[in-house]
Image (tube, grey):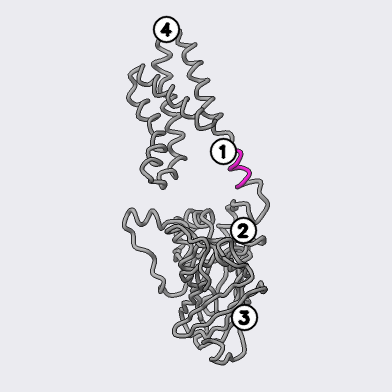
Amino acid sequence: MLLYGSAAVLVVVLGLALWYRQPAAVALAGFALVIPGSWLLGLSLLHSFQGIIYPLTLAGAAALAVPMAAARWGRARVAILAALMVATIGLRVPQFRATTDRYVHSVQPYRTIARQSDTTAIRNIVGNEPVDMALGHAADNHMAIAELGVRGVPLQFRPPAWERSLKNWARLVKCPEPDLYLPKARFTLLEKNAYAPPETVRWVGSRLKLIEDRDAVTVLGVAGTQEMIWDAEWRPGVWIGNTPTTLLIHNGTGRPQCVRLIATTSAGPAHPNRDVRTLGYRLNNHTGTLSLPNENTAAIPLHLTPGLNRVELFVVERASPEPAPKAAVPLLAFCNWRIEVADALPRTDQR
């Protein structure tokens, strides 16, 4: 019904603009045709401009006020135009309400809203120091770009932050992707309840936190995700499929470390048998598998070298039914990851 109502209002506004021979009004109101046009052409990125298109459409309707007021029965015509504009605004009320429910009235940590005092506190701590950003939610990334990056804080995009915010736009303008091997920044910005190495937390806000983890063993980012997910406490996770998902683990201690990568796991809807789950992992030349038939926790032994370590995770069992090309393959949920320093692990733990 909203679609039909919006289409009817648009047709009336364009008809009036053509009747009164107002090219500016036709051009402004006609911007709304970008939405069906982008849908027909498969250019879904254009839908992101709806925040600009809507006020331009209203401006097109408002541009008709002068010629309509100058015509016979001008006041009556302007009153009709005003009612038309009120109807246009009214058609947006359901969206306004849904947006308010999501961004304002949701309980934390699902409320995607940040206080200015939070971003001010982050800027005061980091100064001109670079900050690694591996946030998985687009709203958090956009807030960091607008309130930190635009205001002079050097942001180093780590996956999945780049993929969840700027990747599609960067591809269109041929902007190169960030270098995974950039030196680790002193600070990292991540979700409030995400894992942080011991004694690294420098600030905690309502939704995010800042840690100083350059000299620690820490998860730097997650590349090649099927899809990002979060648990009930807003701790980040990923769906793992048959193609590798790579956890980037930074070892800033300056010496080799034996650790365990621990996470909560559960079989996803694409898994053929919830009672048989085999998680494979690979780090350099060392590979191994974990059988998780009834376990909800995976503990992966790793021998980390100083610097960046790429840990590939994948599910051995094939998805059923076979997923469509480029579709997410939710075989295994891998959430609430953390790193525990282990005693010396024998090489036979990784085979």
Residue 272 in which image quadrant: bottom right
Mark 3 or mark 4: whose residue is earlier in sequence: 4
For the point 41% across and 18% down, the residue is: 66
Instruction: Give the distance between the C-alpha atoms of the residues marked 1 and 2, in whole angstroms.
Output: 24 Å
Give the numbered dot on residue 95. 1
Residue 97 magenta-drawn? yes
Label 4, label 2: how far apart the Cα atoms are? 58 Å
Q: Which class describes the residues within 10 Å of circle 4: few (<14), some (14-19), or many (20+)? A: few
Residue at which label 2 appears: 207
CB under 8 Å between callouts 2 and 3? no
Q: CA distance from mark 2 to mark 3?
A: 25 Å
Viewer-nearest of discs 4 and 1 = 1
Direction top: furthest residue: 72
Residue 9's spot in the image, x, y percent?
47, 25
Which of the pair 170/123 is nearer the observer?
170
Residue 41 picture location, percent across and down: 36, 43
The quarter of the rendered structure image containing the N terminus is: top right
Which dot, 2 or 3, sits closer to the camera? 3
Local secondary structure at mark 2: loop
Span colored in magenta: 96-102
> Compared with residue 297, is residue 173 higher up or lower down, i.e. above or below?
above
Q: Which mark is residue 72?
A: 4
Instruction: Kindly indicate whether the residue at mark 3 contacts the one at mark 1 (C-beta within 8 angstroms).
Output: no
Nearest to N terminus: mark 4 or mark 1: 4
Name which of mark 1 and mark 3 comes first in the sequence: 1
The amino acid type found where label 4 is placed reads Arg
Between residue 25 and residue 187, name the one nearer to us: 25
Q: Nearer the viewer, mark 1 or mark 2?
A: 1
Q: Sequence order check: which comes first, mark 2 or mark 3?
A: 2
